[in-house]
Image: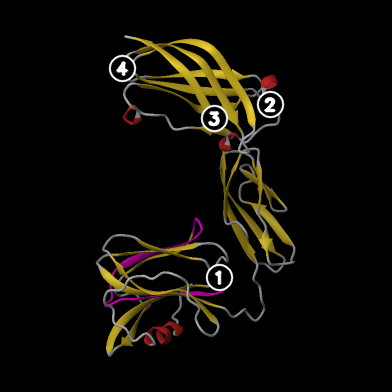
Amino acid sequence: MKKRGNRILVFVLMLALSLTSFIYPGGKASAAGEYNTYIGDFYSANANVAFSIKFTPENPYYMEVAILVPERTTFSYNLYAGDEKIESADVTASSVFWEELSLDGSPYPVYYFTYESATPNVEHTLSLTFLEDTNIYLSVTQDQTAPATPDNSYINKTSMTITKGFSDTVKVVGTSEKITWKSSNTKVAAVKNGKVTGKKAGKATITATSASGKSYSCSVVVKANQYTESKMKTANAVYGNSYMYARKVSYDKKGNLVLKVDFLNFLGRKITAVKNINIQVKNKSGKVIGTYTLKSKKVSITHGKTKTLTFTIKKSKLKQKKTQDLRLAEVVSSGTSISRY
């Protein structure tokens, strides 16, 4: 929702400064009265280069952004609360949200946009991209006056990524009202009393609704329970070396741990065997899930080629019997290549 504001005009007039060259000193300033000023400085912006600045609102109240420039111009902006985009627009010189400000006897355009409810204690990022080089005065303020009927409630997570078969918790803070939880896709993510459980890879939105009808949402991404590593390319290899790394680790239907291990040969000669293979899989807490060892494995890998071998750690040999979150696991591999020309 956008609307014009007048408090910023008074604040900028008090500066009695022209838009020449200024260096951003950084820091947060406190405005008098019932407003908090998170940004209130001059900047130089280069054409077609995103200019970003961060701030963290202290409460969920009304926010106002004012952008003062020497002349009306074309630009775009994006505003994020954490990873969630909450405002964006492509602005032209004819936009209705420009106002004229008299400063030092000369008129300057000011562009306003507002949003009704900030996410408190979450870092916000404002990104501006101008079509031409320009100097700007940027102000971001927040009304510190609570609504007539206070409702400072908010959801503590607006997004989360979880692994299939595992859970995370989201909650509504600042209210004693009964909350009803719902998932947009229960086949992907189920929710009960704020506990979100991943069912299969995909996306879903968790919605919490208070007894008075206020709604909150959290975007959920569920990923497969497997460890993955990008395939190494010869362009990233150093001549005279060979590389061994686990590219995928997952459970099979019997609960065994299956390791897909890549061997990249960049030695300049053929690899005929790999000795003293040792692969250790650890969970996110650093505890060993399982270890695979092999004294020797015959292979045939020519220079510049990669060979994938499959190794299995039986369920009975696993040190952590309970299913682990492999997506957050760590895998350490070692071995010695035997080669010949």
Residue position marked by numbered label 4 in the rendering = 268
Q: How crowded is mark 2: few (under 14 residues within 10 Å), some or many (20 or more)?
A: few
Identify the coloring.
Answer: secondary structure
Mark closer to the chain start, 2 or 3: 2
- The amino acid type found where label 1 is placed reads Ser
How far separated are the C-alphas under marks 1 and 2? Answer: 49 Å
Q: Quadrant of residue 258?
A: top right
Q: Which mark is residue 117?
A: 1
Residue 65 is situated, as x and y percent measured from the top left of the image, at 43, 74
Indicate whether 195 appears above or below 299: below
Q: Is the residue under label 2 in contact with that under label 1 (CB below 8 Å)?
A: no
Q: Which mark is residue 174?
A: none
Say how many tags the image has: 4
Mark closer to the chain start, 3 or 1: 1
Q: How crowded is mark 4: few (under 14 residues within 10 Å), some or many (20 or more)?
A: some
Mark closer to the chain start, 4 or 2: 4
Residue position marked by numbered label 3 in the rendering = 331
Residue 119 is situated, as x and y percent measured from the top left of the image, at 56, 65
Residue position marked by numbered label 2 in the rendering = 319
How far separated are the C-alphas under marks 3 and 1? Answer: 43 Å
Element at label 1:
loop
Q: Which residues fall within the magenta stretch?
A: 61-84
Q: Can residue 213 be seen in this view?
A: yes
Mark closer to the chain start, 1 or 2: 1
Mark 1 or 2: the one toward you: 2
